[in-house]
Image: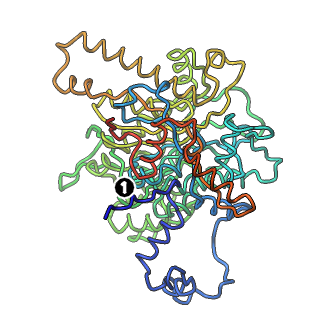
Amino acid sequence: MSKKPEKMSLKSMDMAEDRKRKLKELFPEVFDEERIDFEKLKRIIEEGWGSSGEEKYEMTWPGKNDCLRVIQEPSIGTLKPCRKESIDFDSTQNLFIEGDNLEVLKLLQKAYYGKIKMIYIDPPYNTGNEFVYPDKYSESLDIYLKYTGQKNKEGVKFSTNQETDGRFHSRWLSMMYSRLFLARNLLKDDGVIFISIDDNEVYNLRKLCNEIFGETNFVACLTWVKKEKTSGVPPKNKSIPNKEYIVVYEKQKDFCFNGVSGSKDSYKQDKEGNYYRTMPIQATGKQNNYFHIINPKNGNKHYGNWAFSEKSIKEMIKKNLIVFPKEEHQKPTQIVYYNEEKKSPIFHHMGLYDSEKQTKKFKSQFPNINFDFPKPLSLLKFILEQSTTKNATILDFFAGSSTTAHAVMDLNKEDGGNRKYIMVQLPEPYDKNSEAFKEGLKTIADIGKERIRKAKEKIEEELAKENKQPQLMDENDRKRIGNLDVGFKVFKLDKSNFRVWDGKIDEYVAKQLKLHLDKMISPTSSDEDILYEILLKSGFELTEKIKK
């Protein structure tokens, strides 16, 4: 008897079914056939929780329930390969995906679930001027197709999020929640996410991430300085923003920074021979950790705004890691050992990464791109150094000008790494009056791809100079240069290659059925389009080696 071929779903991972399956593994007793007894589940988890009307601490906003429903709706789109815009399509392990990142994140769930070591994103800061994704979430693929001209786009546009809209914070929160929720699934257990933000939404972002990643998985809120000095005269009682933040969360408790190995010159030695130094524990940011630290030996109370929670300070006191001064008006300090510090989290205050100077340097290196205020390349390289191994996969689904991709390639060139990147960027229209637009770079996605191409050329020029001095190169240098991957595969979000019946029963059902039988596959789809849709939705990565 011949074996019947297995039917394949054309949808992305069903989030609701996946979570239901995991719940069944943990609590099989709460399932009555396939239905969940939620009251029983509540009793098991929190015995005596109280009535259903009991108030509890939570974060909510208008539209959150709609957002949660959309997360669980599978995508029926696909990612179509674009060889003509790619470099080394058949051999590279790097990806550039053009499309709405909500749909793309859904489509990546099966193939990349639990495989990403590090995510970095620089999302809209919600200042009232930036581009905002559509908030008709249930129609995101359809809106995207209309927006990019693949369907009639009359009356369809993406816009800025103005404070006068009435849902200023809510729209931003819904946009971020759905994407961060899906992104968390893609992280490895020891994975980490870095999110750039400024003062406008940093506190809402922290609350959002506490809900998605868990409050205990908060790692740090890093601060970096954008300009060496502010210019102009600020309005009365206001200061010009000169810093930004990078909020860091781990997926589980297995992540740690790689640390910076430094000289022991600034350290002292204790009686056991351990190298140590003392550091302040006062908060220099906006932490609201105001409380007394009590010296257990003499009862002195030292009041201040501290960089650590009260619970953490008490643990440090138990471990003899707090040094108390003689007077109450003086501030305690912490003991940091050399062997721990070089593997400890990077400093919360990362110093200056001059954005203006970096922009000038960027424009001198890439004069035809003309992209204002890209994130500093040195900042991204430092984050990558601290959070990844040499074979890590990095995801950036707000790719912009592709600083992350550039940083990955640069770092691989320097340390011989084989890091791989996945960039995702919406083809947001660029300034029609810019030089970049006149040269054919009509969208932000076009700019991102062009930057990667130019960065590749620059890296190859630098490598060529190294090759002209072989006497200065050792075996590791030759291996590093030989293994460097500076190509990328381009994919673009589109509707499925297969005609998906909407399941509606009406008087035209017979006609619909015949249409599906006669034209199951889109006539505009190539064999390669179909192949990659099947691979992705079967759980294979987009960089799988393919032989004809």
Looking at the picture, how far across and down is residue 205, in whole percent?
A: 60, 53
Q: Is residue 380 left or right of residue 499?
A: left
> Is 102 situated above or below 432?
below
Q: Residue at x 69, y 34 (%)?
A: 149
Report if residue 239 is visible in the image.
no
- Residue reaching furthest right? 164
Q: Quadrant of residue 250?
A: bottom left
| Type of the residue with mark 1 | Asp
Q: Quadrant of residue 447?
A: top right
Q: Residue at x 51, y 38 (%)?
A: 80
Who is closer to the viewer here, 155 or 396? Answer: 155
Q: Is residue 426 left or right of residue 47?
A: right
Report if residue 502 is visible in the image.
yes
Q: Residue at x 40, y 33 (%)?
A: 408
Q: Quadrant of the N terminus?
A: bottom left
> Can you identify the residue that label 1 sits on?
190
Q: Quadrant of the C terminus?
A: top left
Query: How dense is the environment of label 1, judged by Cα within 10 Å: few (below 14), some, or many (20 and up)?
Result: some
